[in-house]
Image: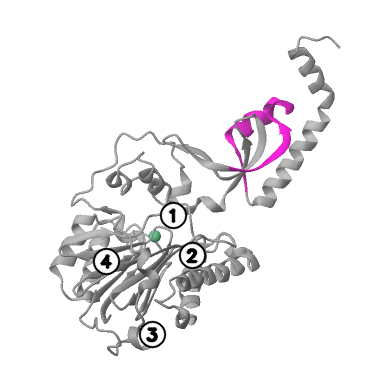
Amino acid sequence: MRARVGAKTDVGQVRDANEDSYLVEDPLFVVADGMGGHLAGDVASQTAVETIERRAGEASGQDPQSLSALVRAANAAIFERATDDPTLHGMGTTCTLALLDAQKVHFAHVGDSRAYLFRAGSLDQLTEDHTLVGRMVREGRLQPEEAENHPQRSIITRALGVDDHVDVDLFTIDVHEGDRILLCSDGLTSMVDGGAIADVLADESDPQEAADRLVELANRGGGEDNITVLVIDLGDDAATGGGSAAASRQSTQPDDAVSDDVIAPRWRLRSRLAVAVGIAIVVLGALTAAGKVVLANSWYVGVNDSGEVAIFKGRPETIAGLDLGDEYRTSRVALNDLPSFVRDDLRQGLPAESLEDAQSKVSDLENLAEDRDFRRSQDRDARAGKSP
Ligand code: MN
């Protein structure tokens, strides 16, 4: 399908640098929103885009899994750089990719950048946000419109580059002439509500003008984050083999192979998004002020439901009753085996810089528990009402 494309990226009003990157290489389009200190986020999003660009020829509408392979290759490239260079440690990026195909668009997606379909005046979000608040919406704990302004909306649960493995969402939609695809980073959607985005897409027929106006709106709304917008207008070249970039790059066999992947848009945005209210929140403080945070990249040592010391992946906090940590490995130590000054810290959760750091903390605790073996056995006897 032939496309006319508008693209714009902007640093916004608050940040020092633009850590978003994008790729326009019809029929392949990508938005990546990087995170990490000291420009590492910029390295992450650029590495994603460059890796995908270099391997763009491998993207095939006949085999949507090829998109997942591209995103995984980007993940591996970022993870490798972050492992090799300590100053880049912990960097990561979102990645939302669209591949135009005859009468279809295929998507691969990780993180909280978004893809939307604008059709007949109505804006539908196609991607699922891999964020904590997105999870709360899916579990029915939060309304979609409450999530838009939620203070913890920048905590993401998936990103490229933070682990050697990444789960990639893959889906395909049917499209026709006149459809518009919007790809954007959260710098747009956190500043401009869905109704206002839809208004611009309805009013402005030129895709570049539309992209410019959306960025301008986000800046007027505060521009608190980098803003990237791609507006992709699907044109009239629907006939197979019509000589478009898409057709020349790909074969034009029937699309039965991917027809099962067609999904319905997840939810329709209301024209006005309400401000989040009435949610009990344990604020994560400086964490979220610093920008995007990846849960998957955090470790701590804490206590499980059985009172055993364990390593957890995630954060020790709870938001609206939702645990942010998942037990990863149980230790040989019970909380009651440890002195009381350590117990309090463990109940709060001891943050660790990495899995290795968490493991070394657990070894220390195991040693500490062994030192106390004698007294512990006395305690146990006392609890059991026995005398030595
Ligand atoms: Mn962002």
Element assignment for label 1: loop
Type of the residue with mark 2: Gly
Q: Earlier in the sequence, mark 4 or mark 2?
A: 2
Type of the residue with mark 3: Ser
Q: Earlier in the sequence, mark 1 or mark 3?
A: 3
Element assignment for label 4: helix
Using the image, determine if residue 92 lies above or below residue 136: below
Q: Earlier in the sequence, mark 4 or mark 1?
A: 4
Q: Is mark 1 in CB contact (under 8 Å) with mark 3? A: no
Q: Residue at x 77, y 37 (%)?
A: 366
- The residue closer to the viewer here, 28 or 366, is 28
Using the image, determine if residue 255 lies above or below residue 327: below
Nearer the observer: mark 4 or 3; the answer is 3
Residue 177: x and y in percent read 20, 75
Q: Residues within 10 Å of mark 4 (few under 14, many from 20)?
A: many
Type of the residue with mark 4: Val
Which label number is shown at residue 251? 3
Q: Quadrant of residue 302?
A: top right
Q: Is residue 192 left or right of residue 294?
A: left
Element assignment for label 3: loop
Name the residue tied to disc 4: 215
Name the residue tied to disc 2: 41
Which label number is shown at residue 79? none
Q: Is residue 190 left or right of residue 367?
A: left
- The magenta span reads 327-352
Type of the residue with mark 1: Gly
Q: Is residue 332 magenta?
A: yes
Q: Residue at x 54, y 52 (%)?
A: 296
Measure the C-alpha gap from mark 4 to mark 2.
20 Å
